[in-house]
Image (tube, grey):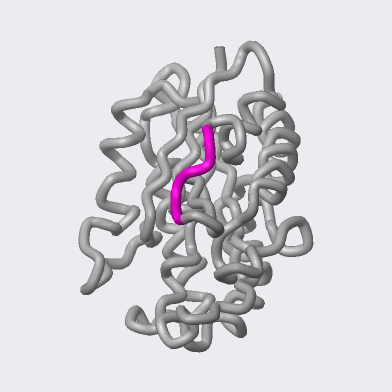
Amino acid sequence: MKTILCYGDSNTWGYDPATGERFGPGARWPGVLARELGDGYAVIEEGLNGRTTVWDDPIDPHRNGREYLVPCLESHAPLDLVAIALGVNDLKARLALSASDIADGAGALVETAQKSATGPDGGPPAVLLVAPPPVGDLGEADEMFEGALEKSRRFSLHYRRVADKYGCGLLDLAGIVSASALDGVHFEASEHAKIGREAASRVKDLLR
């Protein structure tokens, strides 16, 4: 049995942009991933609304992804692979981060996982870094995410740089999925399905 941890934000949790509620387990991308991988794989969901990569949010506390990563890795060990899908919440204007800063924050989490002993036989797990797509029309959240569109358009470049630096897998969602027209940040169920299928392909490649 190979075990996969999906460590992310509201888009891993399964936030439904139409209702503000949670998609069912089979509709969320980790659930699609589990179904695509089939027997012999266990997929653990660890999504938290508002989670950042490594930054403290002064308005929304307890969302720093670095603070919980090590306990999470250790509680679910041994892990064959960790998928890190973070960065959208780092775009909030109050955090004043560049696309490069955000990707480097994700890279710090990759490094933490790679230096851990939470993989098979006390080694590290493989890592799949998931780069968010550009945000869409943010509507009422436009001020909260001021400047986010231009920053998010540079995610592909900087997440690729980070993946190359750490030698981890990369799933760049730009060109694969789009944020919902309802809020410009979250994914419709159809996009979750695409992510799950693409992630399954990457996971199989990394765990060969």
Q: Residue at x 44, y 17 (%)?
A: 121
The answer to which of 62 and 78 lies nearer the viewer is 62
Q: Give the range drawn in magenta.
A: 20-24
Q: Which residue is drawn at 65% across and 27% down?
A: 207
Q: Residue at x 65, y 62 (%)?
A: 160
81 w.r.t. 55: above or below:
above
Q: Is residue 50 magenta?
A: no
The quarter in which the N terminus is drawn is top right
- Give the main secondary structure of the magenta stretch: loop
Expressed as whole percent of the image width and height from the top left, the position of residue 68 reads 28, 45
Question: Residue at the right extreme?
Answer: 175
Q: Quadrant of residue 39?
A: top right
The quarter in which the C terminus is drawn is top right
Question: Residue at the front extreme?
Answer: 19
Q: Residue at x 52, y 29 (%)?
A: 4
6 w.r.t. 48: above or below:
above
Q: In the visual, does 174 lie left or right of 142? A: right
Q: Quadrant of residue 155?
A: bottom right
Expressed as whole percent of the image width and height from the top left, the position of residue 192 reads 65, 46
Q: In the visual, does 53 lie left or right of 85? A: left
Expressed as whole percent of the image width and height from the top left, the position of residue 49 reads 38, 54
